[in-house]
Image (cartoon, helix red, strand yellow):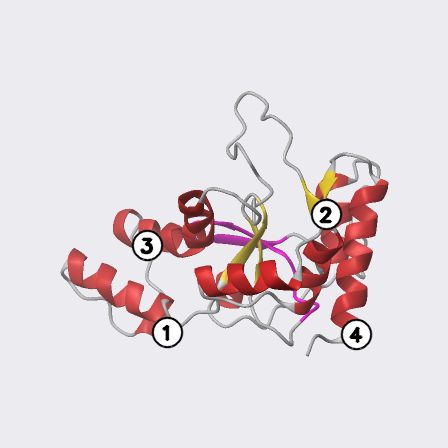
Amino acid sequence: MISNEGVRLGAEAAQRLAQMDLYEFEAGLTAAEFTRIEREYGFEFADDHRAFLAAGLPISVPPEDGQTWSRPWPEWRGGDVDSLRRQLEWPVEGVLLDVEHNAFWYEGWGERPADGTAALETARRHLAEAPVAVPVYAHRYLPAGRGSFGHPVLSMWQTDVTYYGVDLADYMYLEFDEVRGEVDDSWNPRTTAPFWQDLL
């Protein structure tokens, strides 16, 4: 069952993005498409993320020179399976990159193995227990989980994890509205996603 508050929040996020008139939209994902995607990739969308994608799918515009992501909006309908898998694996692979090349080690994993291969395998095993991070746009993510909503949107670049919105609706302004300006003192996002919250 999808929560009413999650539906409201996702619809508000979709409305905010549409009002900015930056992207074209395809029809939203259907229940059958959500079922296929969640089965294919092994996660369930949070309620607000699901409602956002049900309202309409934003279409990526051709990339500008130097843009990291050629298609920042995940192409859930008919997109390249390998590309979507890479986008889903991005947060974990980024942490593993820092484990391997930048001496990162999370204290909750216990003592770091001296052998580099063993350290990577230990980190990979622990990361398999972290909540799945689902791409919203480029390297902005929400935790997966049916029945959940209102999580802050996280910007994830290796172990550099930062807030990019109190929730999905707030994120749409922070990412795409050039006139919004700086956030005020009352802006206080708090994530409850285990592991990822400790990298903030």
Left or right placement of residue 74 versus residue 106 in this view:
right
Tell me the residue that label 1 is attached to.
108
Q: In which quarter of the image is residue 185?
A: bottom right
Residue at the far front in the pictured view: 32
Determine crowd level at label 3: few under 14, some 14-19, many 20+ residues with C-alpha closer than 10 A. many
User: What amino acid type should be assigned to the residue bearing mark 4?
Assistant: Asn
Do labels 2 and 1 touch, CB within 8 Å?
no
Q: Does the magenta stretch include residue 156?
A: yes
The residue segment tinted magenta is 149-163
Q: Is residue 170 magenta?
A: no
Q: Is residue 136 visible?
A: yes
Point out the frontmost of discs 3 and 1.
Answer: 3
Q: Quadrant of residue 21?
A: top right
Of callouts 4 and 3, which one flags the residue occurring earlier in the amino acid sequence?
4
Point out the frontmost of discs 2 and 4.
Answer: 2
User: What amino acid type should be assigned to the residue bearing mark 1?
Assistant: Gly
User: What amino acid type should be assigned to the residue bearing mark 3?
Assistant: Leu
Q: Which residue is drawn at 69% across and 42% down?
A: 58
